[in-house]
Image (spheres, grey):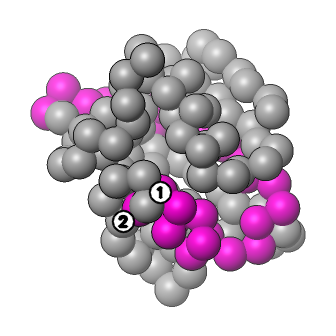
Amino acid sequence: MRMPDEFGGLTCELTDLPNNVCGILHGHRDAGPVASRFERLGWRVSSSSWHGYEVGTTWCEVELEPAEGPDVLLNGVVDPSRFDDLATVLRRCGAGTYTLELYDEDGGLLREMRV
């Protein structure tokens, strides 16, 4: 399995894609600790708002924003061939229960994962 800790910016072919991944990380009231876990795995992390963070690597870049309830929302771009790798990273980050959805360029649902 490829390691998800390839440091650097999103590759050129992915920067032109519309957002194609979204999800909910259940039971996380604050996006900060989740972002810190991504950082420990070698991902780039920056603050994107008062309570939100952008985390990324060469094959994925997502925003983590707290939701109204006890959840964190995730949305951004992932290399479709690395969707399962994103799920692996979430497990390594201790995400617990989460939902991920992968969409095609026209907004059609390709895959859904509930863990």
Of the pair 61 and 103, the residue shown nearer to us: 61
Range drawn in magenta: 12-39
- From this view, report whether residue 41 is shown above or below residue 64: above
Checking the image for residue 49, the label placed there is none
| Direction left: furthest residue | 12
Question: What residue is pinned by disc 2?
Answer: 45
Q: Position of residue 50 (x, y in %)?
A: 51, 86
In this rendered view, identify the residue nearer to me: 27 or 6: 6
Residue at 54% x, 47% y: name it.
75
- Residue 61 percent across, percent down from the top left: 37, 46
Q: Is residue 103 visible?
A: no
Q: Is there CB contact under 8 Å for labels 2 and 1?
A: yes
- Which element type, helix, strand or loop, lies under badge 1? helix
Q: Which residue is mark 1?
A: 38
Residue in the image at 80% along x and 33% along y? 115
| Rendered image quadrant of residue 78 | top left
Q: Going by the image, does 61 lie left or right of 76? A: left
Residue 16, percent from left and from top? 23, 33
What crowding class fits label 2: few (fewer than 14 Cα within 10 Å), some (14-19), or many (20 or more)?
Answer: many
Residue 44, placed above or below residue 88: below
* Quarter holding residue 84: top right
Query: Given the image, on which type of amino acid does mark 2 rest?
Result: Val
Q: Which quarter shows the N terminus? A: top left
Report the residue at 52% width, 34% height from top.
86
Label 1 is placed on what type of residue? Phe
Say left or right for 50 vs 90.
Answer: left
| Above or below 87: residue 47 | below
